[in-house]
Image: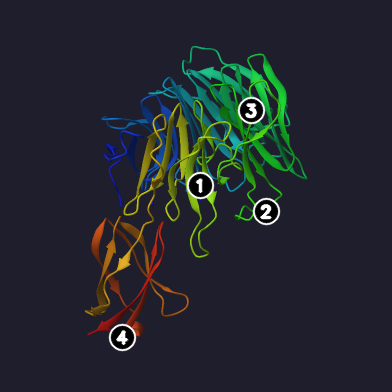
Amino acid sequence: MLRCALPLSVALVLLCGGEIARAARTTTAVAGDVRAVAFTGDALAIAHMPPGGHLTIQRYAAGATPVRLLDTTLRGAGDEAQLAGSGEALAVALQPDTHETFGPSHVFVGPAAGPLREVAACRASLLAPPVAVLGARVAWRDGACGEPAERPTTTTPAAVVVGAADPAITPTRIALDPTLLPMSIALSDAGGLVGALRPSFFAVDSEVRGFSVAGAGALLVSERSAIAAPVGVLADGTRVFSLARLDIGDGDGAVCPNALFTIAAGATERRALPAGGCPLGADAPASAASARVGSSRVYAVVIEAAAARDTPPRLSVVSMRADGGHRRVHATGSYRTPVGLAADGERVAYWHERCGDAVTDVVVVDDAGEDAGPAPIAACRARVLTTTARVRDGRIAVAVHCPQGCRGVAFETQGAPPRRLRSFAFGPGTHALALTLSRTVRRRGRLRLELAVENGPARLAVIRLRR
């Protein structure tokens, strides 16, 4: 489920509306494709890829120009960036998209405002290294590197390393079973949780263990042919987990393969956490769409069944208490959907693309106040206003109205396959779309036009031609 050149420096915009007093929402406009977001106190750390540029991590604070924290050489659509932050520390994990093969990975940590230093690297890594932050403490995966790096046949033993933003503080290394491949980490006051895969020739099993400075702890969760991972630990000690079953279908809506559950502090019994839909990201626990925890609430992006066969499913940002009660829907959209999540205390952030240009809006919601209800993420729509057009030098101009802006591709659909005419990108309003017609279409005197709109429904129109 996983893009018009723009300046890299963008402003922090406060959305003024009738619900501000009830649940404050602020929006940060970010050039290009946002891959990950983390709260760092009163600022945001955002990993994004500007149009035509490389992946970069910047710090966005209200009223200030964004500050560049880390530049990378990554520029692929599937390249991964993972962020974890607090007001005191920031951790960044990077790995290029290697199409399910081994690739280089890097981990950087440091103060929330930088500078960042590299603390771990693999020349060949199957999974992006997980990172976690709690206050000034930072945790990351070390090891699990493919060997030999050119054609890996095995991986090195892995460990969870707990360090700090301050490089003068000596980190603690917690060795793990050499057969485990850590994929997610969550810190708590008493230590933390690590979720790991235990690959075999026949299946992918998983487990979650606690850890402390004394070493790896007891087994908490074990799953066969499923991916179980820690989401985080709430302020009352409740531990939250995600689960992705790998053997009950493809998640097409008939059967949800994903779930959330909790284990109370000091207990061992699981309790299902109803999210009101199928939670995303459980099969990739450190991904942007994975569930998150705040102080007392669990946040998730859930998918709901499509309202009609020809419409896409609806995705919503939801939150709930550990018992599943007091559920809130913060944002919802179908054609244009929330892409990812970040959470901190009583705040949640989600992001979605704009309609008319290569900008992503990162929306922060203060969840401590009264529930203001969901913010709809409207589909990007285009409407063809022209019904008859005059042909001049083989070209016509078609009036297209885009309420919120629109981007996409115009096609001539007389033949099979459809003939691509041109791409377009318009801001809100009515615009002239210039099209060059084939001789066949001009002879017929009629154009069957399709506008394939990004993040919106396609628009069909028939335009009569006159000379």
Q: Is 414 on the left or on the right of 268, as rendered?
A: left
In the picture of the structure, the residue carrying the numbered disc 2 is 249
Distance from the alpha carbon under mark 2 to that under mark 1: 24 Å
Q: Earlier in the sequence, mark 3 or mark 1?
A: 1
In the picture, residue 189 is in which quadrant?
top right
Q: Is 364 on the left or on the right of 149, as rendered?
A: left
Distance from the alpha carbon under mark 3 to that under mark 1: 25 Å
Q: Earlier in the sequence, mark 2 or mark 4?
A: 2
Instruction: Tell me the SS state at disc 1.
Output: loop
The three-letter code of the residue at mark 4 reads Gly
Quadrant where the image shows the C terminus: bottom left
State the residue in front, 146 or 33. 33
What crowding class fits label 2: few (fewer than 14 Cα within 10 Å), some (14-19), or many (20 or more)?
few
In the picture of the structure, the residue carrying the numbered disc 1 is 78
Q: Position of residue 234 (x, y in %)?
A: 55, 25
In the picture of the structure, the residue carrying the numbered disc 4 is 445
Q: Residue at x 69, y 28 (%)?
A: 157
Q: Earlier in the sequence, mark 3 or mark 4?
A: 3
Query: Is residue 55 visible in the rendered structure shown here?
Result: no
Q: Position of residue 279 (x, y in %)?
A: 56, 44
The three-letter code of the residue at mark 2 reads Gly
Q: Is residue 225 above or below residue 464?
A: above
Q: Position of residue 464 (x, y in %)?
A: 29, 82
Instruction: Tell me the SS state at disc 3.
Output: strand
Distance from the alpha carbon under mark 3 to that under mark 4: 66 Å
Distance from the alpha carbon under mark 2 to that under mark 3: 27 Å
Distance from the alpha carbon under mark 4 to that under mark 1: 44 Å
The three-letter code of the residue at mark 1 reads Gly
